Image: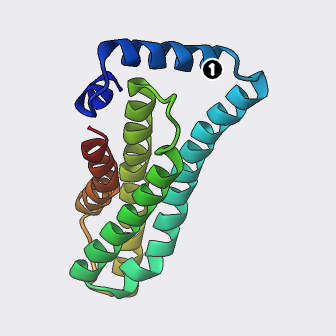
Amino acid sequence: MEKRLHVKGWTMEEIKRAKEIIKKAEKKKHPDIIKVEKSVYWFSLIIGVIGTILLSLILIPILIINSNAWSYILTGMFGFLLGALIIIIIKDLHWLEHHHHLFLSLLIPIIAIFNFFIVVSRVNLFNYSIGLNNFHNPILIGMVYLVCFIIPYAVFLLLKR
């Protein structure tokens, strides 16, 4: 915050005064507001985890029917949209610290990779059992999801600086 205000032409005195006002306001926050802010963070984590699981279930028929290229494109698109949704939710939470962002940006993609590995492996097994030749690389699909999920977050961090 100091850097942004300094770039905008604020003096050190004005920046110091603004920081003191913000600290006072944070201390005077009602406890219920603090609980609501924290619950929004956990809600966004839950949305990310449940969204990832639902997304993998939605992709099952897509993986069964489509070739590799469409599977990767749709997986990437879904990952990008879910990542953008979570960024929209958390971008206005000014109290989030570095470890909150790190936890959010690591937990959901890790769950996604394991989830996609299981789902794609099962889809491949199903395709094999019914005689289809639509086999997919579970690790590659998980990585496509991971990269596309993190793109909105990376853009958010770049714009924040």
Determine whether, in the image, residue 102 is placed left or right of residue 55. left
Residue at the (34%, 76%) spot, across then down: 74
Q: With respect to residue 16, does 142 lie above or below?
A: below
Q: Nearer the viewer, residue 108 or 101?
A: 101
The image position of residue 45, as x and y in percent, is 54, 43
Q: How many marks?
A: 1
Determine whether, in the image, residue 25 is placed left or right of residue 80. right
Q: Nearer the viewer, residue 142 or 88?
A: 88
Residue at the (60%, 38%) spot, across then down: 42
Tell me the quadrant of the picture where the C terminus can be found: top left
The image position of residue 132, as x and y in percent, is 32, 87
The image position of residue 85, as x and y in percent, is 48, 58
The quarter holding residue 83 reads: bottom left
Q: Nearer the viewer, residue 136 or 90?
A: 90
The image position of residue 69, as x and y in percent, is 21, 80
The quarter holding residue 68 reads: bottom left
Residue at the (22%, 60%) spot, across then down: 140
Tell me the quadrant of the picture where the N terminus can be found: top left
| Disc 1 element | helix
